[in-house]
Image (tube, rainbow, N blue to C red):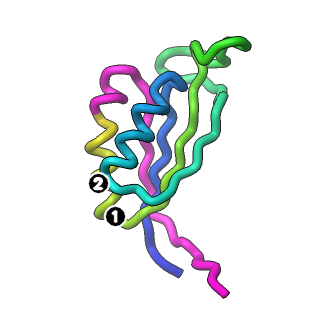
Amino acid sequence: MKPVSKVEIIIDSLEVESVVKLLDEVGVSGYSIINNVNGKGSRGVRTGDVFTDLFQSSYILVVCEEKMMHKIVEAIRPIIKKFGGICIVSDVIMRIHRK
């Protein structure tokens, strides 16, 4: 088992490409994205438009070393400040599954 940081980002779906670009720029080796995330936050209920990405949110998950976590948080700060969203960081234990 290995201690790592879990970075969870919920962002407007229209900004996912910008976040992914930043993740690539800081050297993130992998991430998962779940689109069309519904919920309620400071901008009210977000259920999205059926035909467009308007008012939809996406969830981005990154598991990384602490040093990388700091790079990610600093890189996405301007996007969250400008467009809204949330970034949650947790210390977790990753179980390594290798044969």
Residue at label 1? 66
- Residue at image position (67%, 87%) is 99
Q: Residues within 10 Å of mark 2 (few under 14, many from 20)?
A: some
Residue type beneath disc 1: Glu
- Residue at image position (35%, 56%) is 27
- Which residue range is magenta in the image? 78-99
Q: Nearer the viewer, residue 5 or 34?
A: 34
Q: Marks 1 and 2: in contact by CB < 8 Å?
A: yes
Q: Secondary structure at mark 2?
A: helix
**Residue 20 is a magenta residue:** no
Give the farthest residue toward the bottom.
99
In the rendering, at what x and y percent does residue 44 appear? 55, 15
Which mark, by number, is residue 97? none
> In the image, 32: left or right of 71?
right
In the rendering, at what x and y percent does residue 88 appear? 44, 45
Residue at label 2? 70
> In the image, 19: left or right of 67?
right
Residue 25 to residue 78: above or below: below
Q: Quadrant of residue 54?
A: top right
Separation (CA) of disc 2 from disc 1: 7 Å
Q: Nearer the viewer, residue 31 or 57?
A: 31
Q: Nearer the viewer, residue 99 or 79?
A: 99
Give the farthest residue toward the right.
50
Q: Quadrant of residue 85?
A: top left
Q: Secondary structure at mark 1?
A: helix
Residue type beneath disc 2: His
In the rendering, at what x and y percent does residue 57 appear? 57, 26
Residue 69 to residue 65: above or below: above
**Residue 94 is a magenta residue:** yes
